[in-house]
Image (cartoon, rainbow, N blue to C red):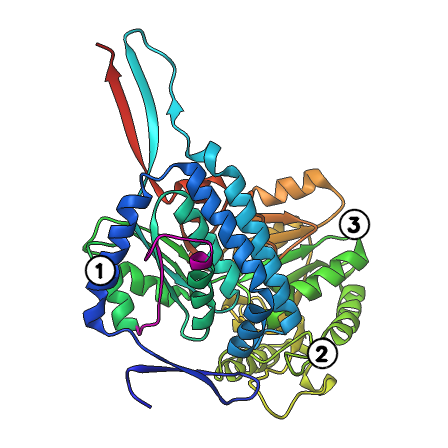
Amino acid sequence: MSSAELRVINPFTEEVELTLPLLPMNEVDRVVGRARDAYRAWSITPIEQRIALCRGFVEAFKGMADEVAVNTSRQMGKPVKQARGEVNRLVERAEYMIGIAKETLADEYVPEIAGFKRYIRHEPLGVVFDIAAWNYPLLIAVNVVVPSLLAGNAVILKHSSKTPLCGQAFEDAFKKAGAPEYLVQHVVCGHDVAEAFVKHPGVDYVSFTGSTGGGHDMVRAASDRFINMGLELGGKDPAYVCADADFASAVENCVDGAFYNAGQSCCAIERVYVDKSIYKDFVEAYIAEAKKYIALGDPKAETTSLGPLASKTAAAFLAGQVESAVKAGGKLVVSGKDFSIPTQGWFAQPAVIADAPQTCSLMQEESFGPVIGITPVANDAEAIRYMNDSAYGLTASIWTKDLDRAIRVGEQIETGTFYLNRCDYCDPGLPWTGVKDTGRGASLSKYGLLQLTRLKSMHLRIP
């Protein structure tokens, strides 16, 4: 294999699925130059035409849905039925952002002063460089690409090296919708070339979804430039199950929230705190539900709920977290022995650890896989302390029938999104954001759209 090629390996077959050429360093200027040319014309295109193009993209993408779902599965192992669901959610998110664009981006007039006209414009930034992650390769990309175009920007999309065909699908769908040439460009490149894009003076905004370490790399790369960055990084999202919760619903959703997409979600439930008065019953019910929910196998099979992991090395890391938790006093109540695990593919052994110590890696470090720790708590105060005992803060959830209690607890949790009686969900009407090592900035909602613009104050003395 040439060093100038990217090999994408199917996590289930463990065979090379496709080989693609990598963009050489000397092409960066040309890609950025084309994007800037496209931006100049697009930035003055009426909002109605921007909206029409994005609606065309949605229709084109729907027409590509089956192909995209299969390609997603063979690149990163997601069960095809879940990949089809991701296409549907992409459509929902895009349509929401399209629906709010005209009102959100309109000029804002401030109170009148005699003799003056004053208003605020939301102008496009220019060229947006979007580095999208592999775990939800369609949703993560759409969060940035569609709002960027609605705001009047051009986009260079660098998708994960695990899922380059998903990035290509965005470029293809916009071409089918009639997008101006080079308005949306997908590039396949290595880390050094991606860093060159971040440093390039023709790039005006960088969005990165990935690890906290990768986020630090992006910030360092842009340290000599005064540009904004959107960073969605790690998570260690907690759930708190109260004694008055709808018990069956809490169990079912906390299992799904932990194991959907093989736990490879930034907002997956990664630790569960349960009121000690219902703890024993909850653990027993959680064990039964996990054994019923989890079916490992070929991602193409409709019966498969957990496909292989996208990374070959991830299973060993997860096994280490489980072993460490057990050595620290946790009880392994669900393990790989409870399931039929395929002999081929990058599968991890699912695990549930009861009585997981708060200080162990399983309760502190992002897992990003099908493992979960459960711990009893005495009251709300202890739950809040444990939930906040993390370097991350993307989402958190509480399970109770008491709305006032939920609000009271939620206001004390250090997180970007707080849920009552739901989890692992991204509502496009609300900003997707995080605190601490989870990153900075926001996507989706009107705030995510406005983040892709710059403010201009129009202060006019009337002649």
Secondary structure type for disc 2 = loop
Tell me the quarter of the picture where residue 164 sits.
Answer: bottom left
The reply to whether dot 3 and dot 2 touch (C-beta < 8 Å) is: no
Q: Position of residue 166 (x, y in %)?
A: 47, 68
Q: Check disc 1 and give the amino acid type.
A: Lys
**Residue 252: % across, % down:** 75, 62
- Residue matched to label 2: 295
Magenta-drawn segment: 174-190
> Which residue is located at x 69 percent, y 77 percent?
304
Instruction: Say which of 97 and 241 sits in front.
Output: 97
Please provide percent x and percent y for residue 423: 64, 55
Q: Amino acid at mark 2?
A: Ala
SS state under label 1:
helix
Sequence-wise first label, 2 or 1: 1
Task: Name the residue tied to disc 1.
Answer: 199
Crowd class of label 1 (few under 14; some 14 to 19; many from 20; radius 10 Å) = many
The residue labelled by disc 3 is 244
Dots 2, 1 in contact, CB < 8 A:
no
Q: Is residue 179 magenta?
A: yes
